[in-house]
Image (spheres, rainbow, N blue to C red):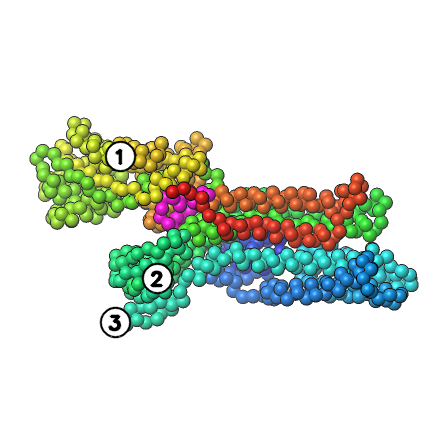
Amino acid sequence: MEEKNYLVSGMHCAGCAAKVERAVGELQGVESVELNLLTGRMTVVFREHGSPARGRMAEVVEKAGFQLADWVDGTPSGKDEEEKAEDAGGARLVWSVLLLLPLMYLSMGPMWSWPAPSGEWGIWANLWGQCILAALILWLNRRYLVNGVRQLATLSPNMDSLIAIGSGSAFLYGLFLLCGGMLRGGRVDTMELYFESAAMIVTLISLGKYLERRSYRKTNAAVKGLVNLIPQEALVWHDGEERAVPLNELQVDDLIVVKTGQRVPVDGVITEGQAALDESDLTGESMPVDKSAGDRVISGTFNRAGYLKVRAERVGGDSTLARMIRLVEQAGQSKAPIARLADRVCYFFVPAVIAIALAVFGIWLAAGEGFSFALARAIAVLVISCPCVLGLATPIAIMVGTGRGARLGILCKSAGALEALSRVDTVVFDKTGTLTVGEPRVVAVLPEHGMNADELMEVAAALEQGSEHPVGKAVYEHARMLELPVRPVADLSIVPGRGIAGTVDGVPYVIGNLAFMQEKGISWEQEQGRFREFMRQGASPLYVGREGRPAGAIMVADSLKPDSLSAVDNLKRMHMRVVMLTGDNAATARHMAEELHIDEVVSDVLPDEKASHIMKMEKAGARVAMVGDGVNDAPALACAQVGISLKSGTDLAMESSDIVLMKNHPRGVAEALQLGRATLHIIRQNLFWAFFYNTIGIPLAAGALYPAFGITLNPMIAAAAMSLSSLCVVFNSLRLRTFKPHLEK
């Protein structure tokens, strides 16, 4: 499989995007395709033998009436003429309005007895003046007409086709009446002329598109804001002096100097100095964090005060900030499952509207109404129908929601993940490193008869040296702190999640959990009474056996993160079922759960069993979010409906998850869930408005109220309603930019 991004330009509605997706998706060698209407970015996944599809893709896209270009580094590789015309949209709108004002004066003046040319020649000058002004406005906005006719010619009409038919037919009908009246030497009924309607339609559409484009820039503000956090160059310490180096030339292990007022350009470890770093742009935390030698820093953080030298560990595209930008872009590009219905409707929407307009025209003629009346109703149907509002309902809310999440330190990898968050009813926490600090410490050493505490620690450190497990590291570091010698070990055998066996000074030893001891035939039933008080306080025993007999136990405890209790309580207030899933023994797990007000605990779970417990919950009907940070959490994160990992977690855990919390605090889980709910709420509002608007607007425009109440909808009002509908969806989505989680401390 190979994935590549392209830029598709010329699209104006969701029907356009659906058409391109379907055309490209049918090409041989294409596995999947996703096209973002807002950005024009098309992501195509090719099968292994997808080269024929690449060659035909441009041809297929151009045949559909659009243009294809490569997408380079998140930006189009170049601007075509149409994009340049869009850049001039503001100027075009201004000229359209300036021409529309005298047009409206000429057309509406007689109704209000405004001063106007009199006499026969004056009336004809007025009418031809309206025609010329309307023609100029149509010419200024010809892009809608040209594209609409082009799409009609290819039998794939879009929103521009509705505009072209509506405004074009109004103008041509008025021109026909005007020319016919002059040739006959008679008068023309000015009430049957729709020059002002034709001009007003395209002007209002142009206004709506201009405001939409400005709003789109706000939806992309999150990505642009993150990009702006990347400095263009860095100060590298080399041969005793500072040297400015472009960011793309930095290498791993470079020594970077970060002064007050500068941003950290890489991920790395501080080797010298101290500073107060502002991480708010990445994590949402408002208070600066004090950093000194040995602490890790991430790219994009701002040095408020201090001087640092940082050893680079991740540079360029591997840095945390670069990965954040990719995740936000990836989420904006993807589609939420709820968007599929709107996409299917959009594909058939425009042809259906044209058919309805033709039917309305025929019905009113058959009912005995005049040609002008029937035409006005058909035009109103065409211009009030808005496929854009359906197409915008989901993607713009997703873009704003994921962007706001990035500012709060909540990275959503896909639109589907954000939607799934809103449906979660069960949150499962891993314990170590998630609810706890993840840095266990030795709190007691309890040797059995025949050994002293130092001997027990020496043996345990020998077996645990090189261990990556937090408990093993704690044992080894405790021995080093006591300055005990680390003995060599032979015949080392590791059983993941259970324990370690090896020979120290010719004597066989084992270290691990109770189940591991039982496998080795070592009984601890009588001795366990000594450990219960420590276990009630949250400590876990690490058992050590010697030659088939108990040798002692090392009590290890981890401390809760400061906000773990608040995180659990807030989730319960949100009516969430909260579960702790841990490999710790039952006594330690229950003690920790009681401190955190967690009612449901699953303990003594092996790493490979976590995923099966998640699947059991989901089979029972639960919608599960799994929260973890370790390698052993990766399978569970991947199989849960939503996997949430913390920033401090391993790369594998972050890759397996759907959501990454940059704050590294469990409270972020509740914040993420609230963001998901708020985003889905906005999407549902948008979709409701989209379907409601078209369901009500089209019959009203068709004249449904005319037989009973004599009420009709002027095409100008219909055009204004269409533009307003799209803007309502955009502005409603932009409310997510001010989203703030509501949590209690």
Task: For marks 3 and 2, give the one nearer the viewer.
Answer: 2
Which one is earlier in the sequence, the residue at label 1 or at label 3? 3
Circle 2 residue = 303
Residue 692's spot in the image, x, y percent?
Answer: 64, 43
SS type, badge 3:
loop
**Residue neighbourhood size for the residue with mark 1, other residues' Cα within 10 Å, grouped as few (<14), some (14–19), many (≥20):** many
Question: For the residue carrying disc 3, how many other residues have a C-alpha within 10 Å: few (<14), some (14-19), or many (20+)?
Answer: few
* Span colored in magenta: 653-674
Residue 569 sits inside the magenta stretch: no
Foreground of the two, 628 or 683: 683
Where is the C terminus found, in terms of image quarters?
Answer: top left
Q: Find residue 353 and report its horizontal and vertical position in percent.
A: 70, 47
Q: Quadrant of residue 577?
A: top left
Residue position for label 1: 588
The Cα atoms of the two marked residues, 2 and 1, are separated by 41 Å
Relative to 677, say whether 135 is above or below.
below
